[in-house]
Image: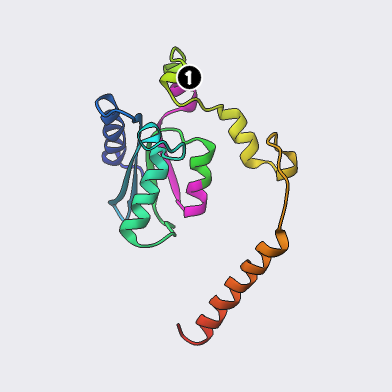
Amino acid sequence: MYQEYFMRRAVEISRQALDLPGTEPFGCVIVRDGAIVGEGLNHSRAHFDPTSHGEVEAIRDACRRLECVDLTGCELYTSCEPCAMCVATMEVAGISKLYYAASMEQAGAAFASLTASERHPIDVDAVRAAAGARIEDRAMPSQQAMDADAVAILDSWVKARKSATASGG
């Protein structure tokens, strides 16, 4: 159930970017059972990390705090509609509900006058297309190599997990 308090907190986190070098105005909170369990602010430039979006940072924070990788039942409140990378991260983490303030179009309009060096440029439509496409249909060239070696490690890892489970470990 939407609660204004949590959205206000996400927007307030985004406001930190007005004074904090290396950040961009995208803030987020993760909520479980009516309590904030994770917070994040976009630190892409500060951390030299293009994945350091507010949503990803909040998910990382929540997972560390809760000592888990499954955020099923959690709600995500963010100051701006998430990009495809953030949506994929939300899906992987199991976020159950999304609330956002500014739309992607509103953010784009606000950033329209900035040069690429003044912001982290993202071609939202290209990211959406690539994220949803099968690997052979993506624009980025790719080539498979050493799959037998990688699959052998995957199989060994699964076998070890089954063995540990069977022995009660």
Q: Residue at x 42, y 38 (%)?
A: 53
- Residue lying furthest right: 136
Q: Residue furthest top?
A: 113
Task: Residue type at mark 1: give it.
Answer: Ala
> What colour scheme does the image use?
rainbow
Q: Neighbour class for label 1 at 10 Å: few (<14), some, many (≥20)?
A: few
Q: In the rendered structure, which segment of residues is drawn in magenta?
A: 89-108
33 vs 166: above or below: above
Q: Residue 43: x, y in percent?
A: 36, 36
Asked if 94 appears above or below 161 in the picture, the reply is above
Residue beneath the point at 51% across and 53% down: 92
50 in relation to 155, above or below:
above
* Magenta span contains residue 106: yes
Give the labeled residue for mark 1: 116
The answer to which of 9 and 20 lies nearer the viewer is 20
Residue drawn 71% across the image and 59% down it:
147
Residue 155 falls left or right of residue 66 = right
Would you say 63 lies left or right of 131 here? Answer: left
For residue 21, which quarter of the picture? top left
Q: Residue at x 50, y 25 (%)?
A: 121
**Where is the C terminus found, in terms of image quarters?**
bottom left
Q: Which residue lies most toward the bottom here?
A: 167
Q: Helix, strand or loop at disc 1?
A: helix
Badge count: 1
Q: Write down the quadrant of residue 68 in the picture.
A: bottom left
Q: Is residue 139 left or right of residue 75?
A: right
Residue 58 is covered by the magenta coloring:
no
Q: Position of residue 118 (x, y in %)?
A: 41, 19
Image quarter for residue 134?
A: top right
Measured as percent of width and height from the top left, residue 139 is found at 70, 34
- Front residue of 72/44: it is 44
